[in-house]
Amino acid sequence: MMLPPPIPAKADANPLPSRMSYDEVLLASGQAESSMGESGDPVVMNSGFDMDKRPQQAFIRSIALPGWGQRWSNRPVQGAFFTAVDVLLWGGVVLSWESHLSNTKHYESFAVEHAGVIGDHNLEYYVDIANFPDVDSFNEFRRTQGDYINQYTENSDYWFWDSEDNRSTFKDLRTQAGKDRNRVFLLIGGVAINRIVSGIEAARGLAAQKSKFLSNTSLHIQDDPSNGATLVGIAYRR
């Protein structure tokens, strides 16, 4: 007794949930060429996400230029934030350094005019002349401390302030120049920290994107009885 041939199951016209967007890769005899890459691997078209990007690459980019790693991984808002911080910090470095140079030049010329300072000197010398009215007072203080070596004995080391007000003004100028210099170092430290934070954030952000993409992606395979093709659907829940 012969049995009737099996009736093929009706193909689902919509194998993917309607709330998902999907890309189709056809792996069939007549359509494989258009869906294969040069290497022969299936191509997922218009996936919207590049799985080849790695967090390490994002990290290196943002270390080199804050925000680059974020923009490279399609997160422009975060990238703009870190880039803006970097620009502001470098702007602060430049302005603080210029202020330091200006105040240094000012207090040095002020010392020449009001204390009779001769020639160029190191920072320690300018600290000393800010704290003592003249070179003899400084040397006398050293001798009372039992220090007969660290004294100013050269003619080029001479100073004598013409008034206490001018010595006080000089002290303020030198102090401000020192603050400007310290601010430069702090801002450069901020530049380094911003780069490290930007790199870490770029790497973590890309890793989170990849994790979300994989968790929301599913593979659907269905035979198309009309032409014998195999339909492979990649579904991504947005």
Image (cartoon, rainbow, N blue to C red):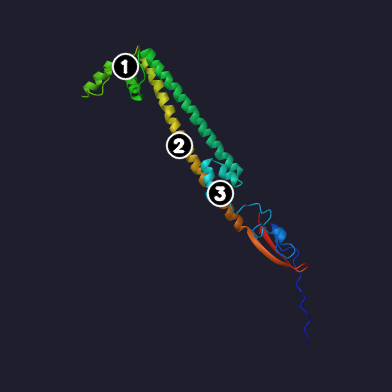
> Which sits earlier in the primary sequence, circle 3 or circle 1?
1
Looking at the rendered structure, the secondary structure element under dot 1 is helix
**From this viewpoint, is residue 129 visible?**
yes
Question: Position of 146 compared to 8: left or right?
Answer: left
Separation of disc 2 and disc 1 at Cα? Answer: 38 Å
Which residue is denoted by mark 2 in the rendering?
A: 189
Q: Position of residue 170 (x, y in %)?
A: 39, 18
Which residue is denoted by mark 1 in the rendering?
A: 156
In the figure, residue 127 lies in which quadrant?
top left
Q: Position of residue 237 (x, y in %)?
A: 66, 56
Q: How many residues crowd around disc 2 within 10 Å: few (fewer than 14), some, or many (20 or more)?
A: few
Q: Is residue 67 above or below residue 137?
A: below
Question: Position of 149 compared to 206: left or right?
Answer: left
* Residue situated in front as seen by the camera: 154 or 110: 154
> Which sits earlier in the primary sequence, circle 2 or circle 1?
1
Closest to the camera, between mark 2 and mark 1, is 1
Query: What residue is shown at x 37% (from left), y 18% (from top)?
Result: 168
* Outermost residue toward the front in this view: 38
Question: Position of 113 compared to 135: left or right?
Answer: right
* Outermost residue toward the bottom in this view: 1
CB atoms of marks 2 and 3 within 8 Å: no
Q: Amino acid at mark 3?
A: Gly
Looking at the rendered structure, the secondary structure element under dot 3 is helix
Which residue is denoted by mark 3 in the rendering?
A: 205
Separation of disc 3 and disc 1 at Cα? Answer: 61 Å
Quadrant for the C terminus in the image: bottom right
Q: Amino acid at mark 1?
A: Ser
Question: Position of 31 compared to 173: left or right?
Answer: right
